[in-house]
Image: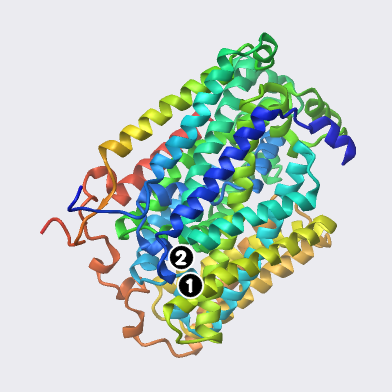
Amino acid sequence: MAEKKKAGAFDIRIVIATLVGIYGVVLTVLGIVEKQAEIDKAAGININLWGGIGMLVFTAVFVAWARLRPIAVPIDEKPADE
Amino acid sequence: MLAQQSILRLDATAIDYIIIALYFVFVLGIGYLARRAVSSSLDFFLSGRSLPAWVTGLAFISANLGAIEIMGMSANGAQYGMPTVHYFWIGAIPAMLFLGVVMMPFYYGSKVRSVPEFMLRRFGKPAHLVNAISFALAQVLIAGVNLFLLATIVNVLLGWPIWVSVIVAALIVLSYITLGGLSAAIYNEVLQFFVIVAALLPLTLVGLHKVGGWQGLVDKVTASPGGGEQMSAWPGNALSGFGNSFLSVIGIVFGLGFVLSFGYWTTNFVEVQRAMASKNMSAARRTPIIGSFPKMFVPFIVIIPGIIAAVIVPELAQFKATGSGEVDYNDAILLLMRDLLPNGMLGLAITGLLASFMAGMAANLSSFNTVMSYDIIERYVIKDRPDDFYLRTGRWVTVAGTLIAIGTAAIASGYSNLMDYLQQLFSFFNAPLFATFILGMFWKRMTAAAGWIGLVSGTTTAIVVFILSENGVINLPGQGASFVGAGAAFVVDILVSVLVSTMTRPKEESELVGLVYSLTPKEQRTEVTLRGDHGWYRRPVLLAGISLAMTIVLNIVFG
């Protein structure tokens, strides 16, 4: 990474993944301790649990994406194929 | 209002407030982080033209996914059903693709910094002033309307006084935009997009489960007032206001699909600014095209919940059957949240709504400050200062814009009808703009005088039609009046522009390179493949073709 200039100040993907990840943890924990009355309200689906798990999966995907393709600005913006 | 409060007040608990608060910490954090990337006015107003296409693409649709969109489209869903999808599949996607494929090369390629600045280069000062001033005015007024809507929702949902929510929301938006400029607005729009999906997707899924899946929904809607035709998008008579099915299809395709939507999506600087912030021509062209993919699926998490609410929320079903009650269609999504979501998910859903309302206002302000600073102050008032003067000006203009928006919100709270009128009126302004732009981009003979005279006469036509329909002289139900108004404005603008052009002297061809199709060399109109732009999935025209094909398939499946 040393020779490549990092783009901007931060990677928005990590910021999004962090927020959604925190939400995912909170909702999953809520879902695990959910009372039956709340589950009945959502038509029998433990939506906090499933929603939370969904968000954790989303977080994992976003982190993986940011890891696999980190943003870096090429030093020169010359056409690559010529 | 009091009765409505008791029905709609959501049972938010500490955990919901924590989820809401967490979001705002991130919003302000993004403003702070984006600040480090701001060192010139171009960084502040156009993110230094450095953003990747997926970021600007999501911001492109997020900027439009505000209060009016979410509440309005779910309300339309509850009232009309599936025909509401035309606002997306007919009324947005073709225009977005057109912007990316045909018009973006001129916007981005000419290196203008705003849509009014394109007007200046193509048609000179009079057209530029007309465009810049009407745009800036519209933006602060709409920002105020967004602010007021947000405050009303917070008041109804959580019980905060309206003025408290107005000031808190204004301060939050103000701080992240003055810090980070357009980058902060765009990054927050991307964050907001995911929060809205995270909020509305579970709501839709739980709602669908509750009505017994898709088939259950079809059965219930068929048995409800309005009947089974609400489950098919075409011909959409109830939506267009035409009794005749053929006329209805024509009205939707030309009125909504062509005149209204092309005007909005291709000339509105709030949208185009997002694409101008992208890092190169290819990314700029891909911005609206990438945005069209999520855009075509937004109806499923906005309109479907509205349809579901109309059949399973007793108060709303009663309103639909009898036309009276303590709630109305605008409450559809709130009622569904109240009935279906447990605490936790409920907090996330409220966060999603607040996020969308604030982003709408932020989008208005971040385009307002650009046009005020670059197009009005730098061009006419205080010229030839060093760049950091205009950067500071931009920050102060944002503060001023926010204060005006608070004032507008106060007016809106007193005269809600007035604000409705204004917004409707502004929607008419886009049609003549589109006429002037498209003629100017493809007809090199069009003169500077034709630019502003056409614009003024088109806009006047729109205002006249608007006044006539408000006074009942023209009597068209539903969306009919705005279709006719926008259509008439478009036609008058073209006719007047052509007429004036034949009588006045055209601009030198050398001045029009990069602005007019026939005078712009192909290399300047198309993207040079830069590193990181390879791969078939990064080719704008191909992507646009895929998007169009998917939209057609959706129309057939849900037709």
The chain carrying label 2 is B
Residue B44: mark in rendering: 2
Q: Secondary structure at mark 1?
A: helix
Instruction: State the residue position of label 1.
Output: B391
The kind of residue tagged 1 is Leu
* Structural crowding at the residue carrying mark 2, measured as other residues with C-alpha within 10 Å and reported as few (<14), some (14–19) or many (≥20): many
Residue B471 against residue B534 in the figure, above or below: below
Q: Position of residue B283 (x, y in %)?
A: 33, 54
Q: Quadrant of residue B508?
A: bottom left
The part of the image, by quadrant, that contains residue B23 is top right
Query: Percent position (x, y) of residue B76?
Result: 68, 39
Residue B475, compared with residue B322, is above or below; it is below
Circles 1 and 2 in contact, beta carbons < 8 Å = yes
Q: Secondary structure at mark 2?
A: helix
At 57% across and 72% down in the image, what residue appears? Answer: B493
How far apart are the alpha carbons under marks 1 and 2? 7 Å
Q: Chain of mark 1?
A: B
Residue B273 visible here = yes
Q: Residues within 10 Å of mark 1 (few under 14, many from 20)?
A: many
Q: Can you tell which mark lies on residue B19? A: none
Residue at the spot 85% in from the left edge and 32% down from the top edge? B6
Residue at image location 22% in from the left, 44% down from the top: B535
Q: Are marks 1 and 2 on the same chain?
A: yes
Please state, as top left, top right, bottom left or bottom right, where the N terminus of chain B lies in the image.
top right
Q: Amino acid at mark 2?
A: Phe
